[in-house]
Amino acid sequence: MIFRGWCAYFFRMTTTKKVYLTPIGVRGMTVLDRDKFLRNLMVPILKVAENTNLSKVTQSCRSFFLKLDNFKPVQDLAGDELFKKCIYLNPEKISDWTDIPEETCTALKAYEIDENNFDSREVELCYENWSYETIFKAVLPEGKEGVSGFSQIGHIIHLNLRDHLLDYRQLIGQVLLDKLKTCRTVINKDNVIDNTYRNFSMELLAGEENYIVTVKENRCNFKFDFSKVYWNPRLCKEHERILDFLEEGDTLFDVFAGVGPFSIPAAKRNCTVFANDLNPESYNWLNHNAKYNKVDMNHFQSFNLDGKDFICNIFKEHIIQTCPNEDNKSKIHITMNLPALALDFVKYFKGLISDANVMADFDIEIIVYVYCFVVEGNDAMDMLNISMGCDMKKYVIDIFNVRNVSPKKDMMRVTFKLTKEVLCGIKDCDVVSEPPAKKLCVDVDNTDKNIS
């Protein structure tokens, strides 16, 4: 009797071996072969009689469904007179009736579903049934970082692949093209940076060579050529934060405007906008988007200048003309969203206005939002002080961590007031003659260059 019981236990253990829902035999594939993803496996099922309340049964065991792409977990059961439907269960969770939690079993028995309804059936799975995550897990090198994330801009999937994945890039591109319905183009950013306009070059991995996209953000539509300008969808929330600081009648100076994620929505909110970008492609799309979104052009001006010239000429002229207006109670906001280089430009605000008569009546609140990359061991406040050549602590309103770029690198926003003292040269503040022994983070960053 003991021997017979042991045999039954051994048989159950060997026939209920856990099944993993992954393709097999495809590790290291660099050229996509969809036929290699064919796999047959035994899957547990629950057989359901015709007169059973199917909706109640499925509700009870929904968390154990076999969920795969292009696969219905509830199907007709052909060739069985007693049972008309079957529910396919996930073999990674369920291999035997006893694997089903007691409370679920109790609920099922209320609808006359018990271990007699439990069975298994062979299922043929193919490439169409596997998600891109499952395929990448089965194909790419074990123990190394996989395709951890990507951005989608319109119909374009934008990757930034690690070196160990470059041999797989064509396969990765094709799989994403197959699996994501809204994707028509997959590209990988490489390490070549155009230093003049600070945009990156890219490699087409799969799909159409079509880089003209339209995206929607903050109730505005932006159209642009993604291969010639920069757009980062991860900054949508930050754009929204800054826009919430603006009130109707305020003025915005967007020093590195890109295609307009700050400028266009600000203009739509009845702010006066001065938008600038050095890249002629960004400048052209900026103007296109202003018209595309029906911006009132009486309150919108665009410029194709270097940031220094924009500050030292356009902004300076506006301050000189605005200061005598005693009725002007609106604020001026200045966005400087080029985190790899923006701190190089804040120094041009210091001592910008030398005319004492102009500054005598200065009563305008000016707020600057400057972005920078801060690597481990550096401090955003110190970086601003070094750039300005003086202690700016008393003028700083906020230092905000926008997002993590890499394990040792963050994108930060430093918000400070541009006061009369700063514009006149801050003669009464402590000058930083010897900067701290820290490296100013202005290196080209291949992940977030020329973010706009």
Image (spheres, helix red, strand yellow):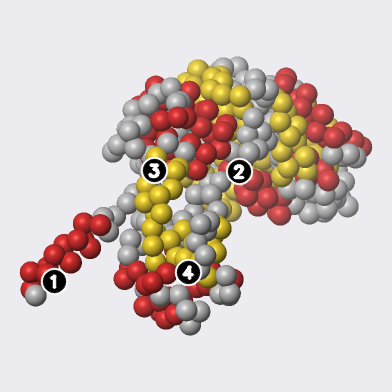
Q: Nearer the viewer, mark 2 or mark 4?
A: 4
**Cα–Cα gap, marks 3 and 4:** 24 Å
Label 1, residues with CA under 10 Å away: few <14, some 14-19, many ≥20: few
Label 2, residues with CA under 10 Å away: few <14, some 14-19, many ≥20: some
Q: Is residue 198 left or right of residue 391?
A: right
Regarding residue 129, the answer to whether it shows in the image is yes
Residue drawn at (71%, 26%) of the image = 212
Name the residue nearer the viewer: 205 or 203.
Answer: 205
**Cα–Cα gap, marks 1 and 3:** 32 Å
Q: Position of residue 418 (x, y in %)?
A: 66, 44
Q: Position of residue 213 (x, y in %)?
A: 71, 31
Q: Nearer the viewer, mark 3 or mark 2?
A: 3
Question: Which mark is drawn over residue 61?
Answer: 4
Q: Nearer the viewer, mark 3 or mark 4?
A: 3
Amino acid type indicated by mark 1:
Gly
Question: Which mark is drawn over residue 235?
Answer: 2
Question: Which mark is drawn over residue 40?
Answer: 3
What secondary structure is found at the residue carrying circle 4? Answer: helix
Badge 1 is on which residue? 5
Which label's residue is closer to the chain start, 2 or 4? 4
**Cα–Cα gap, marks 1 and 4:** 30 Å
Which label's residue is closer to the chain start, 3 or 4? 3
**Cα–Cα gap, marks 2 and 4:** 40 Å
What secondary structure is found at the residue carrying circle 2? Answer: helix
For the residues labelled 1 and 3, say whether their Cβ atoms are less than 8 Å apart: no
Q: Is residue 70 left or right of residue 108?
A: right
For the residues labelled 3 and 4, say whether their Cβ atoms are less than 8 Å apart: no
Regarding residue 426, the answer to whether it shows in the image is no
Amino acid type indicated by mark 2:
Leu
Label 3, residues with CA under 10 Å away: few <14, some 14-19, many ≥20: few
For the residues labelled 2 and 4, say whether their Cβ atoms are less than 8 Å apart: no
Amino acid type indicated by mark 3:
Asn
